[in-house]
């Protein structure tokens, strides 16, 4: 067995000494694996995801991403270059055009030439299906389009890992599928993905593993079909009955 | 969330824009407040041309002072934009020491009247330098003489940068947290995120208050007249003590200040509109 690309060991985190968001989470994710994390709100799933690129600091435990231990990492931005992230609220840069949103980090972080980075950007816009919107500003796009731009922006850095933090939760129902389609294509291409989402359909179609978290701990993990059809834990059954109706 | 910074706080002039196109006629895209500026400017011109005694005399006497007022204001403004940003970044810094330093600076500067600060820089500061010079036997310090204009610009810059840093800080904190997170997640350093993502948005947000700072600075520059700078106000006092016509002298000077502030306000409103229509 090769080394996991993300190695999480016994992570603890609390906010303001009171809320214990993560209580000893351990998780290994292999290269090319697609993992979907579900769980009720406040279960710590987003916090766990944000620890993987250290947008959130953790109190104890260790995380190793692509061979680099995050705890000691002096230059955390070097790790973040390899870990793309997609947010619930898209977080596009509103003062820049779609194209410039995708160019910016390539230029200032990867130090690519204008021509090369623009080629990458246009190819990615083509891939997410909105090549014609290159010159539009984020405010002129629908939520689904904005989220696809956000995915393209993260991909432009050629990350080894992609993190998705509830990527479809802020979208109108009719726009969810266009974003999931892009994510599914990515999964097929062998991208390592960690997705916090309640899209069971996506999990079953694209994920290798589904994880249920509750109260800062991993309750159960299994192949999606098994987790959703035949969970072993009572807690999982209870949660699924609410999500699946 | 993303909608939040799409529209900025409305300024008074926004209520007049865009002018509705009247049927058939071309809508003239000129700010109605320009009219007030034009009226005051015309009044000044009228007084100079048709009542040259004493108004043309006043203007001729104070004209070099007008130049000094403009130079003082513009230089202080540019310098305080830089210093204010440095202080604001200090206050928002990760380092506790820098935060403390910047906070102490703003608290002290904002707690002392500008006039007292100007007097300190011109009269007290050079004495301190001379004392240090004689203590260390360092010749250039011992014979240090303050340049009135330099010290006045220094004083205005230091004072205004403390207020300006608060404006920057409010602007930077007005940008949703997700912007910084998105920039960091792409591998940018905090500095790069500030430089390319946060500040460009914050500056649009704070443009109206920054414009107001310029106008305040223009008016407060009259205080430098007490520290040996021959600005417009000081020249006015000199003219008055020679001719004993206070009413005409100060009416003219007040009107010239008014022309300058009204003009500045219009330019600020114009720039504000331009940056808003860019998105």
Image (tube, coloured by chain):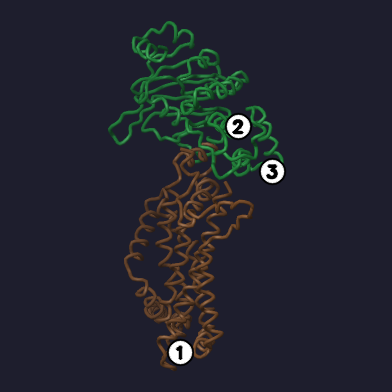
**Pointer 3: what residue?**
A114
Could you confirm whether marks 2 and 1 are on the same chain? no
Q: Tell whether A206 sits left or right of B233.
A: right
Residue at x 43% of width, y 78% of height: B224
Q: Secondary structure at mark 1?
A: helix
Alpha-carbon distance for marks 3 and 2?
17 Å
Q: In the image as oriented, which residue stretches furthest toward the left?
A: A18
Q: In the image as oriented, which residue stretches furthest toward the front?
A: B23
Residue B42 on image: x %, y %: 54, 76
Residue B4 on image: x %, y %: 46, 42
Q: Quadrant of the N terminus of chain A?
A: top right
Mark 3 nearby-residue class (10 Å; few <14, some 14–19, many ≥20): few
Q: Secondary structure at mark 2?
A: helix
Q: Is residue A148 visible?
A: yes
Q: Tell whether B223 sits left or right of B184.
A: left
Residue at x 46% of width, y 26% of height: A169
**Above or below, comparing residue B97 to residue B260 in the picture:** above
Task: Mark 3 vs mark 1: give the one in front.
Answer: 1
**Above or below, comparing residue B196 to residue A171 in the picture:** below
Q: Is residue A31 visible?
A: no
**Pointer 2: what residue?**
A152
**Pointer 1: what residue?**
B239
**Above or below, comparing residue B112 to residue A64 in the picture:** below
Residue at x 46% of width, y 11% of height: A222
Tell me the colour chain A is drawn in.
green
Q: Chain of mark 1?
A: B
Residue A120 badge: none
Q: Chain of mark 2?
A: A
Tell me the colour chain B is drawn in.
brown
Mark 1 nearby-residue class (10 Å; few <14, some 14–19, many ≥20): many
Q: Secondary structure at mark 3?
A: helix
């Amino acid at each position: 067995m090769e080394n996991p690309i993300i190695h999480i060991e016994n992570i603890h985190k609390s906010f303001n000494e009171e809320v214990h968001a993560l209580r000893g989470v351990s998780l290994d994710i292999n290269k090319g694996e697609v993992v979907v994390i579900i769980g009720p709100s406040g279960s710590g799933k987003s916090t766990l995801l944000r620890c993987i690129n250290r947008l959130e600091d953790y109190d104890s435990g260790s995380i190793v991403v692509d061979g680099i231990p995050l705890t000691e990492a002096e230059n955390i931005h070097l790790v973040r270059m390899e870990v793309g992230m997609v947010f619930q609220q898209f977080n596009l840069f509103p003062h820049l055009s779609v194209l410039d949103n995708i160019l910016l980090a390539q230029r200032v972080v990867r130090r690519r030439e204008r021509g090369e980075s623009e080629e990458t950007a246009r190819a990615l816009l083509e891939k997410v299906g909105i090549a014609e919107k290159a010159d539009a500003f984020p405010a002129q796009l629908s939520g689904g389009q904005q989220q696809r731009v956000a995915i393209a922006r993260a991909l432009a850095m050629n990350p080894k890992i992609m993190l998705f933090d509830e990527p479809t939760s802020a979208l109108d129902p009719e726009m969810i599928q266009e974003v999931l389609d892009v994510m599914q294509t990515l999964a097929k291409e062998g991208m390592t993905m960690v997705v916090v989402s309640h899209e069971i359909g996506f999990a079953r179609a694209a994920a290798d593993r589904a994880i249920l978290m509750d109260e800062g701990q991993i309750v159960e993990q299994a192949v999606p079909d098994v987790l959703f059809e035949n969970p072993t834990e009572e807690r999982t059954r209870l949660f699924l009955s609410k999500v699946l109706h | 969330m993303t909608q939040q910074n799409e529209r900025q706080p409305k300024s008074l002039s926004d209520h007049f824009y865009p002018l509705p196109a009247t049927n058939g006629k071309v809508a003239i895209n000129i700010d109605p407040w320009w009219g007030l500026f034009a009226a005051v400017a015309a009044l000044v011109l009228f007084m100079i041309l048709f009542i040259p005694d004493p108004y043309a005399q006043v203007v001729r006497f104070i004209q070099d002072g007008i130049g000094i007022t403009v130079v003082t204001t513009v230089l202080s403004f540019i310098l305080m934009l830089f210093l204010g940003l440095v202080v604001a970044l200090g206050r928002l810094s990760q380092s506790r020491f820098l935060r403390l330093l910047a906070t102490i600076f703003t608290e002290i500067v904002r707690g002392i009247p500008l006039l007292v600060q100007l007097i300190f820089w011109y009269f007290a500061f050079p004495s301190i330098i001379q004392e240090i010079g004689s203590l260390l036997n360092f010749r250039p310090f011992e014979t240090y003489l303050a340049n009135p204009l330099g010290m006045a610009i220094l004083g205005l810059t230091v004072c205004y940068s403390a207020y300006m840093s608060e404006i920057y800080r409010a602007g930077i904190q007005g940008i949703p947290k997700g912007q910084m997170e998105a920039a960091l997640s792409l591998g940018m350093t905090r500095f790069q995120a500030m430089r390319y993502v946060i500040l460009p948005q914050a500056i649009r947000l704070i443009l109206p208050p920054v414009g107001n700072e310029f106008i305040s600075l223009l008016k407060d520059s009259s205080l430098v007249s007490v520290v040996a700078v021959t600005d417009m106000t000081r020249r006015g006092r000199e003219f008055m003590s020679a001719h004993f016509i206070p009413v005409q002298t100060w009416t003219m000077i007040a009107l010239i200040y008014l022309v300058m502030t009204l003009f500045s306000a219009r330019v600020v409103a114009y720039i504000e509109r331009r940056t808003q229509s860019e998105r």
